[in-house]
Image (cartoon, rainbow, N blue to C red):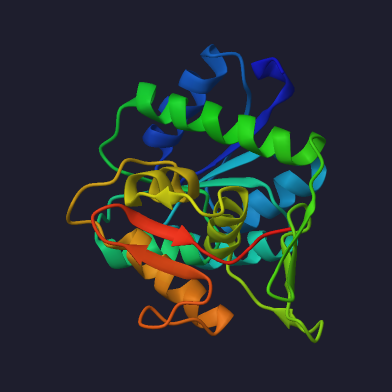
Amino acid sequence: MAASAFHIVIVEDDAVTRAKLAAYFAAEGYRVSEAESAAEMRALVQRDPAHLLMIDIMLPGEDGLSLTRELRAQSDVGIILVTGRSGEVDRVVGLEVGADDYVTKPFSQRELLARVKNLLRRTAQHAYGGGALRRFEGYSYDMTKRRLLRPDETPVELTHAEQLLLALFLRNPGQALGRDQILYQVAHRAWDPYDRTADVLVQRLRRKLGDTARDPRFIRTAHGEGYIFVAPVE
């Protein structure tokens, strides 16, 4: 799809940063709107729904993490958090509340453009490409609705990041997935040896599935390689 088909909303309270980002993405052909607060963003997208939101974490009145959590509960719109904070806890929390990506200031506009293109391509594929039901050990996961049911058909509440991670495992059963591959697919960014985000997400998904690293039914650690989904998938 052409860039002009996508509506990007930049939610940033700093007028200079907001104007620079808006001008850059408009020059790249995107339809761009600006909001300086969560309230202004809500009013804007109610009139004109967005395909992707860039949200600064440090917004006045209501922080970007709370806003992201609210948005994710309502839709699968693409969300990139933009922040000056770079700690691992912040990255994990951003993913847990539903962000698709996490960009730390200062950042290259060209790098941000690449991430935006990648995310819009993925969300478009999700919207128009359909999905499938995957089954494993009595569990069933709807890849389109991102809904996981236990063998007794009760739902398992997954965060957005856990949904993406489970879908990645179910598309690649029996294959060793490295931490770099997991982080790129879930958070759309590169991994470094000190980044424990992928391990934290795997641990949390294991707990949701009642799995353990010591006696794995579903996710086995492949030392030096990453993680393997070992249960048969139908």
Q: Quadrant of residue 2?
A: top right
Q: Position of residue 19 (x, y in %)?
A: 46, 29
**Residue 72 seen from this side:** yes
Decide which of 203, 80 is in the foreground and name it: 203
Residue 61 as seen in the image, left or right of residue 198: right
- Where in the figure is residue 197, as x and y percent of width and height? 33, 61
Instruction: Name the residue at 38% across, 33% down.
Output: 16
Q: Residue at x 56, y 54 (%)?
A: 173
Q: Position of residue 225 (x, y in %)?
A: 30, 52
In percent of width and height, residue 109 lies at 36, 25
Q: Residue at x 46, y 19 (%)?
A: 24
Please, is residue 129 above or below residue 177 in the view?
above
Quadrant containing the N terminus in the rendered view: top right
Q: Nearer the viewer, residue 42 or 231?
A: 231
Closer to the camera in the image, 197 or 98: 197
In the rendered image, the quadrant that contains the C terminus is bottom right
Looking at this view, is 117 or 45 the one in front? 117
Instruction: Look at the picture and state if 175 lies above or below 157.
Output: above
Q: Determine if residue 60 is in view.
A: no
Give above or below for 7 relative to 10: above
Would you say 84 lies left or right of 208 here?
Answer: left
Q: How many marks?
A: 0
Specify the quadrant of the image occupied by residue 215.
Answer: bottom left
Residue placed at 51% from the left, 27% from the top? 22
